[in-house]
Amino acid sequence: MLAIIRKWVIVLSLLGVGGFLLFNWVKFQQARELLPVGTTIAGLDVSGMTKEEAGEYLAERYYGPVYLYHLEEHVELDPQNVGFKLDTESMLAQVELEMAGRDQWLQFASFILGLAVQPISVPLSATHDRPGLEAVLQSIADFLDHPAQPAQMLTQGKAIKEGQAGYVTDLAASLPAAEDALYRPDNRVAKIAIVEEIAPDVDMELLEDAINSKLQAFDGLGSVFILDLQTGEELNINADVAVSGLSILKIAIFVEAFRAIDGEPDVNQQQLFLDTATRSSNFGANLLLHIVAGENNTYAGADILTESMQRLGLVNTFMAVPYDANPPAYRRTTYVTPANSQTDLVTLPDETMQTTAEEIGTLLAMIYQCSMGGGALLAVYPDQLTPDECQAIIDLMVLNEEGNLIRYGVPEGIPVSHKHGWAQATHGDAGIVYSPGGDFVIVEYLSQPGDWLLADQSFPILREIARATYNYFNIEEPYLGNPLDDRAQIDPDNPFSEIYEEQDPTPGAEEGSPETQENEAESDEFLEDTPSEAAESNETGGDTQEG
């Protein structure tokens, strides 16, 4: 009986164990249809999920929006719009491969005993379109960036709007941050890298653009030279082109006359300076050339002036024939210079006296520097010029209240030391402006060869150029007045009445006051060297004859 009972116990035990094993085997096989506990794919826990569920879960997390923050603004990015694609099939295949490589019976034993199994971890496998993402970042930058703004010259040069600071996207630094957010299952946020920009300094390129815009209204040639006397920064617009010397070349006569005078000018000399500067007297200028020559020989004075300009490095500046003179046949009437040797020269300058805007501007700068105790004039002529004499030249030209081109482009009361000049086809002005925002040299010419240049065409442009330049140096307190107001009106019947001038078509002729016309007969006595005078001059080291 006991044997029978023992037998049934064994049978029942075996049946129980078999049933237990069968039950767990069924459960084990069912579990094998799911991903094992501890399985992570692309950083996500997919334990207990089917492959289909895992694929859906991955898509849900990785195809969700990425938020790109541009300072306080944010843009929602759909990953698929930048070609982001999960390689779900490959990642699930890696899980299957890992599971297939494990011993089934050991896994079953671990399952029955409830032992932990080695986790499976598969890294993210995905791709995206990098150029597409760069394009998205660029479009965000284009829409939300506020680049620093340069200063702007307002309409008609009335004022300058100062530059503004700003910020721009650093695309190179932003791209990795955006890519990291694409490849994260959570915290899918990226901050776009922003670079702050300071407001650009105002530079002469702004002024150059403003002046060029004004010159577009002129069908001739504009020649402009501007020099910042504080920094030495220059602006050149056709400033190396040969132009007629005009009465502007009287600035060089002032320098040479003061160089020749030993001590203070006497009363008569002072009057010559005053007439030449304030009334543009050609007669007075020629008498100053006598002082330069040390004799009553205007041509000798012109030669000394030309030689001096060469010594100062102003190789394009010369006076071959004095004002209102009819040179004798044996007398040279011009010089060949780098500027007038250009084959495309369009200004057709007076052959008897020439310069360039740059060289006249440089001479004015030399006078300014000399008045301060330095510069080229004192270096070349240390025993013949003094700072006081250079200051006297500046003060003299401040008295010139005629030829109002530069003067009407700046506020009343601003000192302008200048000399104007014009002939049939060329109008110009050159001076030093003492402005609150800084001292500067401005030289401006307009030339219209082959035609009569009308004052009502040239004067407004020259005055507007002067105002734009003044406002460039005085951003805080620009000149908002109208250079074409009542004080600057042009008399259409007598446009040059400001300086009481008449046009003279003779070679070298230019401005001349009524006094000049009255004294032409008298001036002819010393303007020309007769052959006998020239011979005597040669014997004494005076005026050299050149054919």
Image (cartoon, helix red, strand yellow):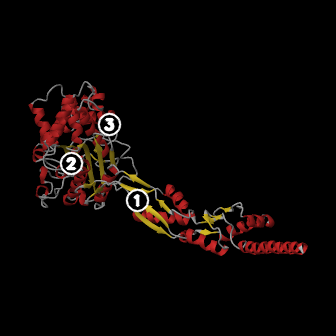
Q: Earlier in the sequence, mark 3 or mark 1?
A: 1
Residue matched to label 1: 71
Q: Quadrant of the N terminus?
A: bottom right
Residue 353 appears left or right of 129: left
**Mark 2–mark 3 contact, CB under 8 Å?**
no
Residue in the picture at 33% in, 33% down: 311
Residue 229 appears left or right of 109: left
- What amino acid type is highlighted by mark number 3? Glu
- Position in image of residue 368 (x %, y %): 24, 36
**Mark 1–mark 2 contact, CB under 8 Å?**
no
Residue matched to label 3: 546
SS of the residue under disc 2: strand
Residue 110 appears left or right of 134: right
Say which quarter of the image contains residue 446. Answer: bottom left
Q: Quadrant of the C terminus?
A: top left
Residue in the picture at 46% in, 59% down: 192
Say which quarter of the image contains residue 366. Answer: top left
> Is residue 20 positioned above or below 178 on the image?
below
Between 165 and 298, the residue placed more toward the observer is 165
Between 34 and 519, the residue placed more toward the observer is 34
Task: Measure the C-alpha gap from mark 2 to mark 3.
Answer: 28 Å
SS of the residue under disc 3: loop
- What amino acid type is highlighted by mark number 1? Leu
